[in-house]
Image: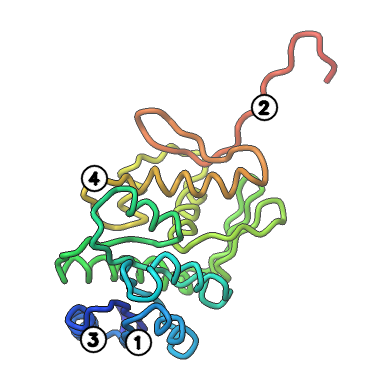
Amino acid sequence: MADGDRILVVDDEQSITDLVALALRLDGAEVEVAHTGAGALEMMASFRPHLVILDVMLPDHDGFEVLRRMGWERSTAEVPVLFLTARSGMDDRIRGLAAGGDDYVTKPFSVEELRLRVRAILRRTRGYADAGGRIEAAGVVLDEDAHQVWRDGVPVELTPTEFRLLQYLMVNAGQVISKTQIRDEVWEYGFDGRVNMVEVYVSYLRKKLDALGPPLIRTVRGIGYSFRPERPAPAPPGAEP
C-alpha cells in the first residue's frame, strides 16, 4: 500500500482494532477505528477512507447492514470493503460478497494474510487513477478515469471488484481467459477454494450487464470465460434479408 492510504477498521474488539491498526500504520497507511456500526457510518464522511475493514458481528448493526447504509451515499458507494467474519459457513461468505463486499477474512486470521489482501484491494482500486482512458466493446463503455460504466448509454453501477473484472474481460475481448488468469489478475492471490470467487463475481457482473441487453460474457466449458456478444442465429433458407 502507499503512504497516505486511508483505512477505516471497524470491530467491536479493541484488541483486534489495535493489532490491525498497528500493522497497517507500519505499512504507511492512515488508520481510524470504530467499534460500532453507527460509529463507522459517522466516520465515513469525515475520514473518507479508501478502504473499510468491517466486522460482520457488531453490537448495534451487523456488517451487512452497515455496508447497505454506506451505499445510500453515492460518495461512499464505491469504497471497497473487506469483511472480517467469525462465521465460517459458505452462505455467510457469499452473503457478504453479494452485499457488495470485495473480499473477506475469517477469524481467527493471520495479520500477514490481512495485509496481503488489503494491499491487493488497494492496488486494484487505487490504481485506477493512474490507468486512464476508455475501453469500448460490444456497446459497453468503461471509463477508467471516472470509474464508470455504460451499456448502450445506460449507466451500470459496479463495485470496485466488478469493475476490475469487467475491465480485464474487456481488455481481452474476444479471447478466452481461464479462471486462473482472472483470479491472478483481478485478486492477485490464491483462495482456499471453498468459495469460487471468479464464478461468484462473473455471475454478479452478468446480472447487471444482461439486464440491459443480450449476454456478453460467455462461458467456455473447461476453460473459462470470454467477453463477446452472442452471434445472431443464421436466417433459415429462403428468409428475406
The amino acid marked with disc number 3 is: Arg
- Residue 151, position in %: x, y? 66, 52
Which x, y percent locates residue 217?
A: 52, 40
- The amino acid type of the residue labelled 4 equals Gly
Q: Nearer the viewer, mark 1 or mark 3?
A: 3
Nearer to us of marks 3 and 2 is 3
Give how far across and how far down residue 150 sits, in percent: 65, 57
Q: Nearer the viewer, residue 160 or 177?
A: 160
Picture disc at residue 232: 2
**Amino acid, disc 2:** Pro
In terms of secondary structure, where does tag 1 sit? loop
Label whose residue precedes the other's in the sequence (1 or 3): 1
Q: Residue at x 69, y 19 (%)?
A: 234
- Residue designated by label 1: 4
Q: Are marks 1 and 4 in contact (CB under 8 Å)?
A: no
- Determine the image quadrant of residue 241: top right
The residue carrying mark 3 is: 25
Q: Position of residue 19 (x, y in %)?
A: 17, 81
**Residue at horizontal 25 percent and vertical 45 percent from the top:** 194
